[in-house]
Image: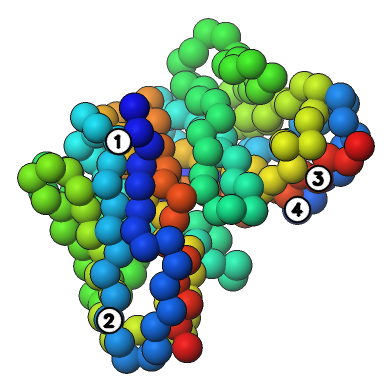
Amino acid sequence: KAGVTQTPRYLIKTRGQQVTLSCSPISGHRSVSWYQQTPGQGLQFLFEYFSETQRNKGNFPGRFSGRQFSNSRSEMNVSTLELGDSALYLCASRTSGGITDTQYFGPGTRLTVL
Amino acid sequence: AQKITQTQPGMFVQEKEAVTLDCTYDTSDPSYGLFWYKQPSSGEMIFLIYQGSYDQQNATEGRYSLNFQKARKSANLVISASQLGDSAMYFCAMPRNQAGTALIFGKGTTLSVSS
């Protein structure tokens, strides 16, 4: 099976712009989660989508939003970019749920905000 | 609330040696799972091994094994016969809730393997 894919891999934006990141999960996986990784804050959970519905949300401002399509592909949008949004954004997919269900990560999108 | 602590910022080991990466956790849930991931410099998080709180035996996956001590709330990763390709950042993680979503991660340990 193909793994989780994320596009684009690298992105450079300026403050105030908005950005959309894409994630295609492993075939058959219905849950997609997004994480932000920065040197200062480490890995932080953004949100999870399951069957096109946001099922869980982390502690991020409303500028961070997402959605999931009927084919389980997910997009994450960040509006009004700030310098602090520079990070590696990781997407993870899993089959459905439960504490034993492993999340498999994609290669990430490295966002730089200038 | 769940918490993961990794106290070793960096570890250095020679090829073919075994190494133990420490992870302690805190949770009040009776049922939980613990995951270890490897992150090379490329950035991708690679799943290594999983341990369930009710598993009778310590998990093993090839050269990776978990030294799971439930009473001490520790889940240390043991890598046997280290290889140069093992050089990476290693994270211990557990779900924030019983639905298994929202992994919380430790700060990670950087492992450097030399020849």
Q: Are marks 2 and 4 on the same chain?
A: no
Tag nearer the camera, 4 or 3: 3
Q: Which residue is mark 3?
A: B112
> Amino acid type of disc 1?
Ile
For the residue marked with disc 2, what is the amino acid?
Answer: Gln
**Residue B9's mark?**
4
Q: Which residue is mark 2?
A: A18
- Judge whether B73 appears above or below B80 on screen: below
Q: Could you say which disc has been placed on residue A26 in the image?
A: 1
Residue at the location (45% across, 67% down)? A10
Residue at 63% x, 29% y: name it. B75
User: Between residues B10 and A69, which one lies in front from this camera angle?
Assistant: A69
Query: Which image quadrant is residue A25 in?
Result: top left
Q: Chain of mark 3?
A: B
> Residue B23's spot in the image, x, y percent?
65, 38
- Rounded to the nearest angstrom, the CA distance separating label 2 from label 4 is 35 Å
| Same chain? Circles 1 and 3 | no
Can residue A56 be seen from the camera position used here? no
Residue at x 73%, y 26% (from the top left corner): B79
C-beta proximity under 8 Å, tags 4 and 1: no
Looking at the image, do the residues carrying marks 2 and 4 touch, with CB atoms under 8 Å apart?
no
